[in-house]
Structure formats: structure tokens, C-alpha cells
Amino acid sequence: MPATSTIRTVAEVMSSPAVTAQSSESIAEVSKRMAEQEKGSVVIVDGKRPIGILTERDLVRFNASGAAASDTKVSEWMTQPVDCAAPDLSVQEAFAGFAEKGYRHLPVVEADELVGVVSLRSLMLFAQVQPVVHPSAIEAPPGLEGVIVAETEVGDVRGLEGFYHYRQYNAVELADRLPLEDVWHLLIDGHLPSAAERDAFADEVKPLRVVPGSVAQLLPSVASSSHTVMEGVRSAMSMVGAAEGYRPTLDIGAAERRRNALQMCAVMPSLIMAVYRLQNDLEVIEPRPDLGYGANYLWMLTGEEFDADKGRAVEQYQITTIDHGFNASTFTARVITSSGADVAAAVVGGMGALSGPLHGGAPSRALALLDAIGTADNARPYLLDHVARGEKIMGFGHRVYKTDDPRSTFLRSVAERIGADKIDFAKVVEQTVVDVLAELKPGRDLYANVEFYAGVVMDHCGLPPELFTPTFASSRVIGWCANILEQAADNRIIRPSARYVGPPPPEPLPDPA
Ligand SMILES: CC(C)(COP(=O)(O)OP(=O)(O)OC[C@H]1O[C@@H](n2cnc3c(N)ncnc32)[C@H](O)[C@@H]1OP(=O)(O)O)[C@@H](O)C(=O)NCCC(=O)NCCS
């Protein structure tokens, strides 16, 4: 809505006459005058010409210095030379100038004579706040696409080349060849473990799989009061942080932050299976320290020994999803950490972001799509209709990849290796989706993403669809934690800006109804 009021000038909003002082006066005299007249600044004059300004902010700095106010001259603490505003300057221009230079008070001068003082507060009361042009403001595209917001050593995604890496290693190669704990060590401690470090790391993290007693006691209520496993685990993770007395990352050192992070990563798989079983009226199965990551994960699902290849396949899926650049949940976890909050708060925030269908909520929908299509003959007509109705095909498309998603290619090979039930049909559907999208959405470069074959692999390994997104979270928590530790180690609060586009303020309040 455009501003309709007439343009106001500085002369209309300034306070006049200005409170003034001589540069030879003491801070004590001048601050007393400011307090008596309830003003936030005093203009220092030579005759009628302003030569400096002393503001509340200067007095705060002065008080912190510990010097004696009665023995210190104003000239030592005033800001000089001083910028001035003209009385006929529009409120809007003055406001932009204040924002640009960080001023709070300016003397107003006409023909070299002081006629008043204008403050940021008075400008704000009257400014028709249109977009403030700030020279250092950067216009970010919707969805922050392509915007670099931090430096990281955790990893990166190279969308055009179809490649991503954890630290300096190809993530797919790590998933192909190493156990998850090695990759976990790489993410949290910065390097792949030696044999001795591997053992020490296992000794450190395996006890942390156990859910703290006070949280375990409450899990039945948590499970029954949540609709999804993800909701229950989100609450339980928060409770672990509280029960274990996690403190703000701002107040603790690197070792304590690392301890908290390791516990978050280790306990989440146990909580996922506990909540799932409780929601299905089954008894919780305790984690087994003698089993590796993937095998223990499946053990806690059924209490039965699994085919080792299935355990490895799930673990490989989990390795591929540990980290993936500044995706929505990782960014969320870093934003929360940047406020100095505790590790659990950041992890729980990440879980919230991951639960959405556009991020981690897609694999069960991708599998449901296969079921809905049903037969190879039905694939093309079904998909044409789906896209024509403006619906997205879950498990396809990616913000960064404009070629094959390497995670999808890898998981397709895993699904083939384990002889997943739905693999042949999934490959037919994948090709049909790619063709249909190329026809109906030309130039968008839409291919299968990690979620498409993730569902096929997890389904074959016995994980029910309601565990797909939690399983994604079970390893992404490691990526979040690596990012949380990195953010906390070199922190500045993440605080961007938005452009206000609503009706121009200040509008008078309506009369009470
Ligand atoms: C992943 C995703 C959120 C990326 O979003 P994005 O970078 O903002 O891309 P957009 O949603 O703006 O899509 C760009 C274009 O491609 C189309 N498109 C993107 N993904 C599509 C899909 N899966 N099915 C059909 N069309 C799709 C959009 O409709 C849009 O078309 P338009 O130009 O005609 O408006 C998006 O591809 C998507 O929603 N995919 C399905 C959900 C999914 O699988 N999520 C898991 C991600 S790992």
C-alpha cells in the first residue's frame, strides 16, 4: 500500500531549542543538564555553531572508563567533527542517513546556526517507513538460493558435477568402504581414525546409546502423546538435553560441547526404535554394545539378528545422509547455535526442519508413489496426470543437483546388491519420471534425489515407512552436530534482515471496538 501522507521534514520532528554545552564544561555538569532536560544528547557549540555532540552512548563509555566526571572535560569525550542535518531534509532521507551511518542524534543547522536536534527515535515516530536503502544490504534471492552464508570445513555439495564430500573425502566412497563410526569420527573430530582411535571412539560412544533413566521412564507417555515417531523423538531428544543438564554452547568449552554432541548422535537411534516400539505396543529393546551401528539399529527394531547385508545397507544409507551442505535443517541448527543455545536445542530445531516433506519427509511418500502407480504400464499416464495437476513427484528434483544425485545413484546400486523387492519396478518408474519431467518441465533438470531409492532400500531391510524420516534424522544428527561444533567454535549470531512490505507505519491505532 503506498504512503499517502504528505512528506514531513526534519524541522517538524526536531526538538528545539537544542540543549547545548561548552567544550570546557565538565562531564558532570553536562550529564546533569541532559538528565534534567530528559534529552539523549547535548550539542557542543562555539557561539551558535555546533562543533561536537555528546550522547548517552558517550556517557556509557565514559562511565565504563572509571574516570571522575567532575575532573573530565566534555571536549575529551564528545564526537567531533559532527555531521549536521538541514531542517528541510525529508524525514525519509534523514532516516536513511541515520541507518547508513548508525547515528542516533544529529544537530540541525540552518545558515551555520544550531536550530535544534533530531533523534532517531523522533524520526521513527514519523517516518513513512519505506524500504531503507542500506549501502551494505545484499538482496538475497527467495529461498536463499546460491547465497553463501558461512565458511565451513565440514563438507560441500558440487551440484553441477554431481559430487559431494565430507571434509576432503568423497562421501559416496566413504559410504561404500567404511563403517559409520569412522565417518562419524571424521565429522566430529576432523580426521579418519587410526586403529587405536577407532577403538577409543567406540568405547566412548557405545555407552552413550543408552537412554538416560529419567527419560526412559517418561518414554511411554511421550510415545503415546505423539502421532509420529519423529514427533516423539523430537520431544525425547529435548528431554535428554534437559536431563543431562546441557548448558548453553556460549558458556561451555569445546570438550563439553563435543560430549553433548556425541550423546545426541549416539542416543537418537535408541530413541527412534524405543518410540516406534512403544507406539506399536511393543517392549523397548536395549542397544547392544557388541554390535556396530547399522546392525544395532536393526536389532533395536525387532530384537532379532539381521542378515548382515541388510544391516550394512541401512548403515550405508545412513552414511550417505550424514551431511549435505547448508540444507534447511543444518542451517536451522547453525542459526540456533549462533544464539548460544545448547546443543540439544539446536538438534531439536534441526529435526523440526527435517520433518517437512520438502526436506526429509519425502522417502515414505516416494515409496507410496511406487505403490500408487502399481504397474509399469500405469507409470506414464499416472505421472502425466500428477504433474498436470501441479503436484510434485516426491523423490525427484533438488535445489543444488542439476544432474544425477550421487546419493541416488549409490543407493540404486545398494538396492540392486541386496536384491530389493521393488528395485526393478523403481528403475522403470525413475526413467519414466525423468522423461515426463523433461517433457512437462523442460530445462529444470529434474532427476531422482536421495529419497527415491532410500525408501526402496529401507523397505527391503524391514524398516516400515514411519521410520524412514527418523532414520534419515538418525545419521543427519551427526552432520548437524559437526556444524553445531563448528559454529560454536567461531560464532557470530546469524541475524539477517527482511524488507517490510506491509502498510506504511505508523498508523493511528483504531478506537477500541
Ligand atoms: C527438492 C525441492 C524442494 C527443490 O526445490 P527448489 O529448488 O525450490 O525447486 P522448485 O520447487 O522451485 O522447482 C523448480 C521447478 O521444477 C519443478 N519441480 C521441482 N521438483 C519437482 C518434482 N519433484 N516434481 C515435479 N516438478 C518439480 C517445480 O514445479 C518448478 O517448476 P516451475 O518452474 O514450472 O515452477 C523440489 O525439487 C521438490 O519439492 N521435490 C520433491 C520433494 C522431495 O523429493 N524432497 C526431498 C529433497 S532431498
Image (cartoon, rainbow, N blue to C red):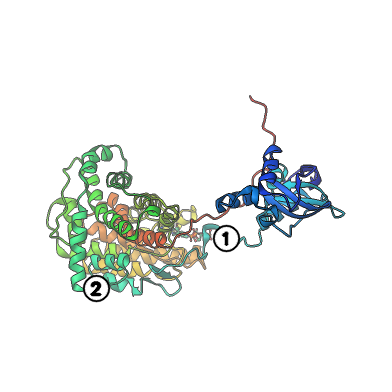
Q: Residues within 10 Å of mark 1 (few under 14, many from 20)?
A: few
In this figure, what is the number of numbered marks? 2
Q: Is residue 428 left or right of residue 107?
A: left
Query: What residue is disc 1 on?
Result: 140
Q: Is residue 257 left or right of residue 36?
A: left
Q: Residue 297 at what x, y percent from top left? A: 20, 56
Q: CA distance from mark 2 to mark 1?
A: 39 Å
Residue type marked 1: Ala
Q: Which mark is residue 31?
A: none
Query: What residue is disc 2 on?
Result: 177
Q: Which is more toward the observer, 223 or 392?
A: 223
Residue shown at 19%/73% (left/top)?
A: 195
Q: Which is more toward the observer, 497 or 102?
A: 102
Residue lying furthest front: 71
Whether residue 420 appears in this view of the structure is no
444 above or below 261?
A: below
Disc 2 is placed on an element classified as helix
Q: Is residue 497 left or right of residue 185?
A: right
Disc 1 is placed on an element classified as loop
Q: Which is more toward the observer, 65 or 402?
A: 65
Q: Earlier in the sequence, mark 2 or mark 1?
A: 1
Q: Quadrant of residue 404?
A: bottom left
Q: Residues within 10 Å of mark 2 (few under 14, many from 20)?
A: few
Q: Is residue 330 left or right of residue 2?
A: left
Residue type marked 2: Arg
Q: Residue 180 at what x, y percent from top left? A: 24, 65
74 above or below 326?
A: above
